[in-house]
Image (spheres, rainbow, N blue to C red):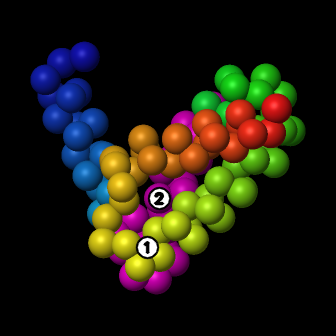
Amino acid sequence: MTLADAASLSTREDDLDALLVRAASGDCDAFVTFYDATAPRVYAVLLSLTGVAHRAEALLEGIYVEAWERMRGRAAPPCPGMQWVSAIAHRHAIAGR
């Protein structure tokens, strides 16, 4: 990873966090954009944890419903957005075993 790659990754994380801040104020389009940007990575995490595609797909929706509900009224995500939604995904996958 180069310095430019690290800076780009940081910018993308900042963009995801900004989307969550907008979503917290009720901006559904911002949350959809956050979903579109993060769902493939979250699905990959779920698939690696569950080993079953249909189980990973089933968990995905619940994770984003929880994220939407937990973001309402917040000023910012509790940690970087991708890290936060990945932690929710991990908890859902472990609980579903």
Q: Which mark is residue 37?
A: none
Predominant SS of the magenta segment? helix
Which stretch is magenta?
19-44
Is residue 48 shown above or below 22? above
Instruction: Give how far across and how far down residue 31 sits, in percent.
Output: 49, 67
Write down the quadrant of residue 75 in the picture.
Answer: bottom left
Residue lying at 37% horizontally and 72% vertically, measured from the top left: 74
Write down the quadrant of residue 16 in the picture.
Answer: bottom left
Residue in front for this viewpoint, 76 or 48: 76
Q: Is residue 49 left or right of residue 24?
A: right
Residue 74 visible in the displayed image: yes
Q: Which mark is residue 23?
A: 1
Residue in front for this viewpoint, 56 or 95: 95
Q: Residue furthest front?
A: 95
Q: Amino acid at mark 2?
A: Phe
Instruction: Give how far across and how far down residue 43 sits, in percent.
Output: 65, 38
Residue lying at 18% horizontally and 18% vertically, measured from the top left: 2
Q: Secondary structure at mark 2?
A: helix
Q: Residue furthest left?
A: 3
Q: CA distance from mark 1 to mark 2?
A: 9 Å
Queried whether the magenta region covers residue 41, the answer comes back as yes
Disc 2 crowd, CA 10 A, few/some/many (<14, 14-19, 20+): many
Is residue 85 shown above or below 6? below
Residue lying at 82% horizontally and 32% vertically, measured from the top left: 97
Earlier along the polypeptide chain: callout 1 or callout 2? 1
Q: Quadrant of the N terminus?
A: top left
Q: Which mark is residue 34?
A: 2
State if disc 2 and disc 1 touch (CB < 8 Å): yes
Is residue 67 shown above or below 14? below
Q: Secondary structure at mark 1?
A: helix
Instruction: Give how far across and how far down residue 51 sits, in percent.
Output: 79, 23
Q: Amino acid at mark 1?
A: Ala
